[in-house]
Image: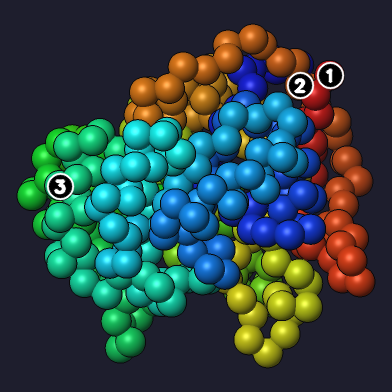
Amino acid sequence: MLKIFRPCDFHVHLREGQVLKHVLKENNKNFQKILVMPNLAKPITNEKILSKYRALVLKNNRNTEILFTIYLNQDCKISDLKNMIKNNLFFAAKLYPLHATTNSSSGVKDIKKMSKYFEFLEKNKIPLCLHGEHIHKDDDPYERERRFLEYELSWLVKNFKNLKITLEHITTKDSVDFVKLNNNIAASITTHHLLENTNTFLGDYLKPELFCKPIIKSKKHQKSLLSAALSGNSKFFFGSDSAPHLKKYKFTESCCAGVYSTKYSVSNILELFYSSKKTNNLNKFLTINGCKHYNLKFDNKLISYVRQKDFKFQKYSKFKNDSLINYNHFKNHWIIN
Ligand SMILES: [Zn+2]
């Protein structure tokens, strides 16, 4: 048996409509807090869109604290941001480089032209969450994250020393090292980037359900992510980047990016820490480190999980006339006692 605080997921996509209800229900089962991403089909760039989305999410939410984000781009108006902060409508700003991932066609082409926004966030103590990939059409997708550190992130941390930054869903040793070396920056890590590598993703057969951005990296990088997460280092915490996609959009000619991991993410993380004999750092990775980074209080009531061997996993969750593909890694499963 393992006793842990109810976990937090500091990076999740709820999307909209019927899928939102389904995904939020899974989140309510597992998490005390979730940080919700703003890249809807029409991104959340102003108060009108945010208010509508807040109402939709809060109406369907049961028992999870929802932390909203806004989609920071050149269309955002400082006066509008000011107003939303005054009314406590969002918690953090998320920045996507142009065309970095699903629904990022409104992303930022040149972040160095966004200084007035960064100054504003810094002054108002609003965290900046970054999709950390440098997107250039001729660059190798495997190099995007490393290049982002070099071209964009180094510039950001040098020029906005008091801006609180989260480098989201890191996938490389380069990012682990960068985060360790710099102040005011922490990183979220997903389940699938901790548990998969290029061999498991495309070594034998290609697994479209593991295709995501940033793309899953080699074993060398996976090892570095694992040691950062398992060590309990306060700069690294859980953010699933769980993103629901219908099977018909994953197993097709143009497979879209995203892994839907919510159903089994806590179980997978528990099994990882248990089998690595690091259960003493579980609360740090799943709750404490993220809350510390974001200055949030958390519920410290303990919840018991028990381990089931050779559990029968549900790979597909029926959804309308299709399915959502659930990500799972281990054979053993942890359930709430
Ligand atoms: Zn994401």
- Amino acid type, callout 3: Glu
Mark 1 / mark 3, whichever is N-terminal: 3
> Which one is in front, 282 or 219?
282
Element under label 1?
loop
Residue 215 location (% of width, % of height): 48, 67
Secondary structure of the residue carrying numbered label 2: strand
* CA neighbours of label 1 inside 10 A, class few (<14), some (14 to 19), many (20+): few
State yes or no: discs 2 and 1 in contact (Cβ < 8 Å).
yes
Q: In which quarter of the image is the C terminus?
A: top right
Q: Nearer the viewer, mark 3 or mark 2?
A: 3
Choose the circle earlier in sequence order: 3 or 2. 3
Query: Which of pointers 2 and 1 lies earlier in the amino acid sequence?
Result: 2
Amino acid, disc 2: Tyr
The label shown at residue 337 is 1
Q: Quadrant of residue 111?
A: bottom left
Disc ID at residue 305:
2
From the viewer's perspective, is 28 left or right of 167? right
| Residue 119 numbered mark, or none | 3
